[in-house]
Image (cartoon, grey):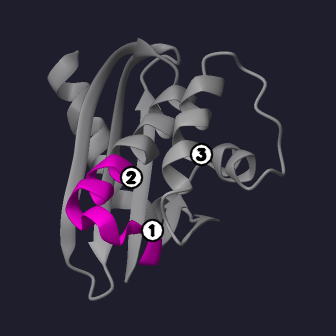
Amino acid sequence: MQFTIFADGGARGNPGPAGAGAIVRDEKGMIIAEVSEFLGHTTNNVAEYTGILRALEKLLEYIGDQASETEVVVKMDSMLVVKQMKGEYRIKHPNLTPLAARVQELIRQFKSVSFAHVYREQNKEADALANAAMDRGS
């Protein structure tokens, strides 16, 4: 099985009112889960990581014990977070460390998880969900 996660997060004012958004698609392109969560007052990077985290949690709920046979590609427009998750950049901010550790915990349950940077135009759905969350909360 293969799934693609499009994840995004944002904060108005950074830090400011923040939201996380994500779409999980199966190999046929069908949406199997969506995330749109208001996070209160935090940074855009916390929101980016939360988008990944919530999408992985929803995917695990959906596939259950088939996670070890599942390949996942996470696509997002945050070059920083993609490079951090690939191990190319260190995670320096203390607010990101526990979120990144939780994402790594979830990743270990899958056969493979890879991260890819995409341009904002390719991540419109996740961006819209993150913005909708910010709109609801602010």
Seen in the picture, residue 101 relative to 110 is either above or below; the reply is above
Q: Residues within 10 Å of mark 1 (few under 14, many from 20)?
A: some
Residue located 38% across and 74% down the image: 3
Seen in the picture, residue 133 relative to 17 is either above or below; the reply is below
Residue located 33% across and 72% down the image: 66
> In the rendered structure, are the residues bearing label 1 and label 2 in contact, judged by CB atoms less than 8 Å apart?
no
- On residue 104, the disc is 3
Q: Earlier in the sequence, mark 1 or mark 2?
A: 2
Q: What separation in Å lies between label 1 and label 3 (alpha carbons)?
A: 25 Å
Residue extent of the magenta highlight: 55-70
Q: Which of marks 2 and 3 is nearer the N terminus?
A: 2
Q: Provide residue 90's location: percent of width, then percent of height.
A: 83, 36
Look at the image and tell me in which quarter the N terminus lies.
bottom left
Mark 1: which secondary structure? helix
Q: What separation in Å lies between label 2 and label 3 (alpha carbons)?
A: 10 Å
Q: Can residue 96 be seen in this view?
A: no
Q: Provide residue 59's location: percent of width, then percent of height.
A: 30, 59
Q: Give yes or no for residue 114 being in the magenta stretch.
A: no
Q: Residues within 10 Å of mark 3 (few under 14, many from 20)?
A: some
Mark 3: which secondary structure? helix
Q: Provide residue 134's location: percent of width, then percent of height.
A: 27, 27
- On residue 56, the disc is 2
- Counting every numbered tag in the picture gives 3
| Magenta span: chief secondary structure | helix
Q: What separation in Å lies between label 1 and label 2 (alpha carbons)?
A: 20 Å
Badge 1 is on which residue?
A: 122
In front: mark 1 or mark 3? 3
